[in-house]
Amino acid sequence: MSHPSSRFVAIAFPLLVLLTSMAPAQGVVYREKWAFLHLERLRAMVFDELKDRDVDAIAHVAELLAAEDGGVAIRPVAQALAWLRGVECDDHFQLRAAMAAFVLPEVVDGKATVAACRAANFTLYLPYPIELPGEVAFAIRVRDGDGRVVRRLELRHHTSFDDLRTAQAEASVPAGELPDGSYEVEIDTLIDGAGARAHDPRLRWRFHVLTGFQERCDLALGRARELREALPDLARAQLDGLAAEVVRVYTGEAFAVESTAVADLERLERCLANVTFERPPLAGMTGSVAAALPIGDIVQPVRLRLIDEVEQVTARPLVVFASAAPCYGAHGRRPIGPATRSALWLERELGSFGRARGWNVVCVDSPGGGRPYAKALLQTVQHLPELLPPGDRKPLLVCDREAAAVVALHLGEFREHISGLVLVGAGSLPKQAVAALGSLPVRLVLLHGYPGSRSIQRLLDYVAVRSRQGEHRPDVELLHDRELPWPFGVGLSLAEIEAFAESVFGG
């Protein structure tokens, strides 16, 4: 939902300038963000079906995901998913894996001032140049929160290869046909009249209907602008982090994992009530909460998984996860957009990590977007104890790929602020940093086919040489001896990360 009032939010919230400046309707960057969302979605399906498989299966999928994709990033992922399901990745499977859809707006509002926001709009899009194996059409089913099919549509026009590549196939459901609530749209790609087979990937996205959503957004964002300037830096950043989620919905930017747009607005409204009555901005919130921390004249988005309500917080061990950057394959080819990878994707892989032990968990967005990432992450680690006190235990820091490469090069600045470090997929520590590690424990994870992992082996070799020469041997070793699929180094190492955290936290 785009609206002129969103412009004042961009002026008031430095974090949001990038968001609002990169939302030209259906522009190249805009489309690529949605296309990348679908690639991430397919990877998440692979992760879900892989995480409980045996070592041999994980190794085979690692081989598949590291294969050259010929410029079509979906292919290795589709092949991995087909292998996990025990079927051939034929043309039909591959096309159904590749089909994407813009589901906009995320929140349908029958009272919206923008006509397009008064209907649920489904636009079919083929992000990759995959040949159509037959005549294509689409069967669309909309289910309510109880799983009942409440609307069926068929889409048979503008479904040629050229039309799908340029997102010309569209269908809509007016707001008046859907009561307020949460819905799921399922889009079945028909090929020569035949629907998806049992093993084919299914295209499903959540959306919402809420009458008066735009008006509530306007009020909340306007109130946020009024209140933020009088707040101290930490409280202002938390308010900005919650407002950013609402502005993202307003500008029609692609979400991460799934749409939680209504809950995001409700959390912003709660935050505003808290600030009005001089309570902590996140008072009354638990579970996964969007926030941000002040980093000089910018703010760093974070996801907080809170065990306690903030106003009743007790000292708990804290584990901070830093995400890898968005990329199309193991060799680092990057999309034009998004510039950074949302922490929500990494948070999704964590599942219930640390919850039974009572640990707070924070996930941080990836490097990218022109931010001074080392500075931003370091100050995030320094600020977090103000919000989530870890007692006498410093946070454990876990970094994936590009985040690991950045932290490795700046480890001297981080060393005094963390209790331990896990570097996944990259670990090029300068020699002087190795010598200065002292007793800081560092664990490393190798990723199959990922070029950055060569730096891990070099580091291990250097540590071994130091030991043979009688110099102090730092506490640097592999977290485990497996080479994991390159996108899933963190998610497939959680048991070992938890055991390592337990050791550095002291039980």
Image (spheres, grey):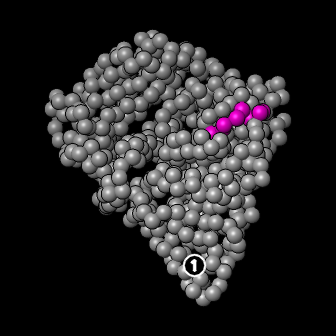
Q: Residues within 10 Å of mark 1 (few under 14, many from 20)?
A: many
Q: Nearer the viewer, residue 47 or 33?
A: 47
Q: Nearer the viewer, residue 78 or 311?
A: 311
Classify residue 121 by image quadrant: top left
Q: Which residue of the protein is positioned furthest toward the front in this rendering? A: 507
From the top left corner, tell me how far across and down residue 492 is, in percent: 46, 52
Q: Residue at x 55, y 80 (%)?
A: 464
Q: Is residue 469 magenta?
A: no
* Relative height, residue 503 to residue 287 (above, below): below
Q: Residue at x 73, y 60 (%)?
A: 417
From the top left corner, tell me how far across and down residue 253 is, in percent: 52, 37
Q: Residue at x 57, y 64 (%)?
A: 443
Q: Is residue 456 visible?
A: yes
Q: Residue at x 37, y 34 (%)?
A: 101
Classify residue 153 by image quadrant: top left
From the top left corner, tell me how far across and down residue 15 is, in percent: 66, 44
Q: Is residue 73 visible?
A: no
Q: Is residue 304 magenta?
A: yes
Three-letter residue code for mark 1:
Val
Q: Which residue is mark 1?
A: 463
Q: How many marks?
A: 1
Residue 492 appears left or right of 320:
left
* Relative height, residue 407 to residue 169 (above, below): below
Classify residue 473 by image quadrant: bottom right
Helix, strand or loop at label 1? It is helix
From the top left corner, tell me how far across and down residue 112 is, in percent: 55, 18
Span shown in magenta:
302-312
Q: Nearer the viewer, residue 330 or 231?
A: 330
